[in-house]
Amino acid sequence: MFDLGLSDYEKAEFLEAARLAGYWLVNSQNTARRPWGRVAARDSADRGRLLEKVCPSREYCQPAGVWLHGIYIAGLLDLARTPILDTHLYKSAAEDAARFLTALQCFDQRWPRAIGGFHELYPGHEYSAPRDAASGSFGLIALYLDTGEQDDLDRAVRFAEWYATHGSDEDGYPWDDFDLEKGRGTSRIRGDWQAGGALIYYYLWRITGDDRWKTAMDRVLAVLVEVCTNAPGTDTAYDFHGSCTLSIGNDDFANTALFAGHQMFGRQEYLDLAAERLRAELGRQAENGAFPNLGGTFVTALELLDALDLAAEDVEVLPPDDIRGPMLRAARYGLSLQERTDKDRFLLGGVYGQSNYGTARDTIHGRDTGYALQLWMRLAGYRASTYTVLGW
């Protein structure tokens, strides 16, 4: 872990922000103790489900699907291992969320080309976005690392088998969309944002040593290199996933996948490409530390932090002096996006997002809250279980 030179106060501030983010998850979760509505959730398909976003001005809440549950579970379990008070609350919330996540995994024998994948929003949903499903599988890895339960690892393996076959095209790159009932995938455009899901292959390789995950990762990175090499030279800082080839600011952890590729294969080309991409992202940072694209302030900060941690292991992506300052400016700006004064249980601790550079404060979103939770814990000096190549 790279020594950032943070004071004890700064570390405490980041840990407290992480605690509050976890508190938002605990308070806004649908359980029999804290149901969303008047009907208790004990027998509901939404038992243990968490929220994707809250829009206070419209009194509107949207339940989360598979990708956010994976992120949330990882963050809650990591948070429960820190020295904060009431860690049982976060552990319990993760366990409840895991019930919902596993209910989303598809084992419907009527849909043979869907087995192992995830329903996107609710049990039985015919639709899957494979990259979202990959984020869900990170939650399975986090559960396995926390509990050692073989079922959690088996589920992650079964997902990765689907992801590498039916969930991806002939080159091994994930589809944009997948019809679970019909067993058919489609893609509108091959973008860098799809590559981050390959971290599931890296995590399984580290856990099992099975070389088939190296093969799957190799195929994804070959496409990513081609995508980056042949990408049009247009402004992509304001286009979100699915509508662009390169996503500057929030690339959905494609750079982290390149770091993982270097760890697996030792290929310098992956570090060189990551360095080129990070330079492009650093060139878009605002003076206050914010990065463009929805969630970009936290995604880019996490990638820069991982690059610093690699530097501590003598693997240099960019000179540490070039990225420490920008990473910390982004992290400190991110603190300003957290709701810390409104005591509404659906607001307190959540992080405002869904606006470019984080310039608006009308939507608390799980993307920013989940990524911020990972970032802030690491800045406080604690390991996180996902979006990193050197954690655990």
Image (cartoon, grey):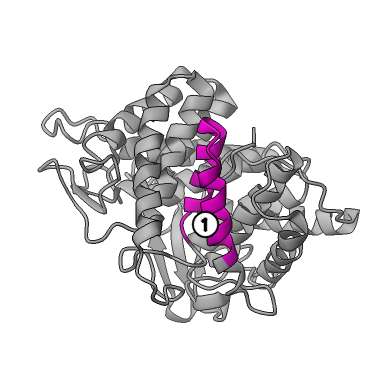
Specify whether residue 72 is painted magenta: no
Magenta-highlighted stretch: main secondary structure? helix
- Mark 1 lies on a secondary structure that is helix
Q: Nearer the viewer, residue 302 or 227?
A: 227
Position of 33 with respect to 174 (left or right) is: right
Residue 103, compared with residue 44, is above or below; it is above
Can see residue 351?
no
Task: Report x, y in % for residue 259.
Answer: 55, 43
Which quadrant holds residue 287? bottom right
Position of 73 with respect to 335 (left or right) is: left
Task: Report x, y in % for residue 306.
Answer: 64, 48
Task: Report x, y in % for residue 120.
Answer: 29, 49
Residue 76, compared with residue 265, is above or below; it is below
Magenta-colored span: 251-279
Residue type, numbered disc 1 = Ser
Which quadrant holds residue 337? bottom right
Residue in the image at 33% along x and 45% along y = 44
Q: How many residues crowd around disc 1 within 10 Å: few (fewer than 14), some, or many (20 or more)?
A: many
Position of 228 with respect to 266 (left or right) is: left
Task: Report x, y in % for residue 117.
Answer: 28, 37
Q: Dividing the image into 4 quarters, which one contains the N terminus?
A: top right
Residue in the image at 45% along x and 57% along y = 51
The residue wearing badge 1 is 28
Specify whether residue 253 is painted magenta: yes
Residue 160, compared with residue 296, is above or below; it is above
Residue in the image at 50% along x and 38% along y = 261
